[in-house]
Amino acid sequence: GFACNKGLLSRDVHHDPARVDHPIRRGPDGSWTRIGWDAALDEVASRLRAVVDEHGPSSVALYLGNPVAFNAAAGPAAGMFLLSIGSDRLFSAGTQDCANKFAVGELMWGSPKIHLVPDLDHTDHVLLLGTNPRVSKGSFLSIPDPVGRLAAVEARGGVVRFVDPRHVEPKVGETVQIRPDTDVYLLAAMLAEIDRTVGFVPEAAARVRDLDALRAFLADFPPERVAPVVGIDAPTIAAMARDFATAPSASAHCSTGVNMGRHGT
């Protein structure tokens, strides 16, 4: 086994006297010996070559997490590394956490790289499902200090509303607690309520293919029917729908809690 420095998590880690900043080899007895970079790279390469020769290129996989997502060179370099080996096994945090967003981007917008995100600086009402920005740092929103940006929505008189089984931690907005993995029914009920009360914006509705079929489908999911499924009373669902539809501007965003559910896409 080998241990190598993998990046700097903080100034404390960077200056820690126990930080590994050179290759070391583990011996049969478990002890570690320092070796040179050339020797380490040659040995890793020979072991990897042996794995590929015995099991084929697809026996080698890469897993990429958040640090690589914010490194402009690391992602392409990892892809080129796999291509040079001949493997097609590339996994990431996105494989588990947000594959639904990539699928929707491809189906609706023609590219898995296109994602709609709330314009927090201008929205008057933001609905956040299955996300805790204190923990995720905003995920796909990709903005500094997401909790502070949400607080700014409230400060200018806007609404911040979380939908989550647990009470969301940031001291901003309100949390409507929902039964896990039932968000799709809540959204259907909100759309049904908007359709039968406030109505859809005509210009937007004109862009929806088969709108009549959609409205007929949603009619089977009014708040009264959905309430016992989601664990939220019908008046609250109806109020959430009308609040969203009558806001001067509104946006919705879902993240890990919904992405990983049965109905994430």
Image (cartoon, rainbow, N blue to C red):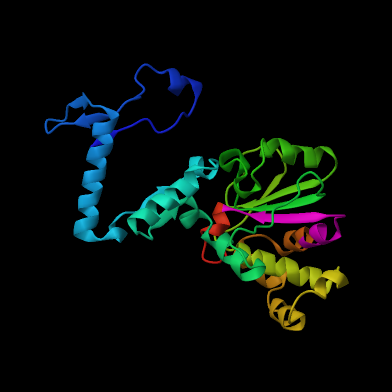
Residue 211: image quadrant is bottom right
Instruction: Give residue 97's position: percent from left, percent from top.
Output: 50, 54
Residue at the image position 65 percent from the left and 38 percent from the top: 170
Q: Nearer the viewer, residue 148 or 86?
A: 86
The question of residue 246 being in magenta is answered with yes
Residue at the image position 71 percent from the left and 35 percent from the top: 148
Question: Taking 210 as reference, is 94 left or right?
Answer: left
The question of residue 234 being in magenta is answered with no
Instruction: Give residue 227's position: percent from left, percent from top.
Output: 66, 66
Q: Nearer the viewer, residue 48 or 220?
A: 48
Q: Nearer the viewer, residue 17 or 167?
A: 17
Asked if residue 60 is positioned above or below residue 16 in the image, the reply reads below
Question: Taking 93 as reference, is 121 left or right?
Answer: right
Question: Taking 80 as reference, is 51 left or right?
Answer: left
Q: Which residues are magenta?
A: 241-255
Check the picture and name the quadrant holding the C terminus: bottom right
Q: Number of labelled discs? A: 0
Residue at the image position 50 percent from the left and 21 percent from the top: 11
Extreme residue toward the left, this view:
29
Residue 116: image quadrant is bottom right
Asked if residue 29 is positioned above or below residue 94 in the image, the reply reads above
Residue at the image position 82 percent from the left and 45 percent from the top: 158
Q: Nearer the viewer, residue 43 or 258?
A: 43
Instruction: Give residue 13's position: percent from left, percent from top.
Output: 44, 23
- Res. 171 visible in picture: no
Asked if residue 200 is positioned above or below residue 160 in the image, the reply reads below
Check the picture and name the quadrant holding the N terminus: top left
Instruction: Give residue 17's position: percent from left, percent from top.
Output: 37, 16
Residue 184: image quadrant is bottom right
- Res. 107 visible in picture: yes
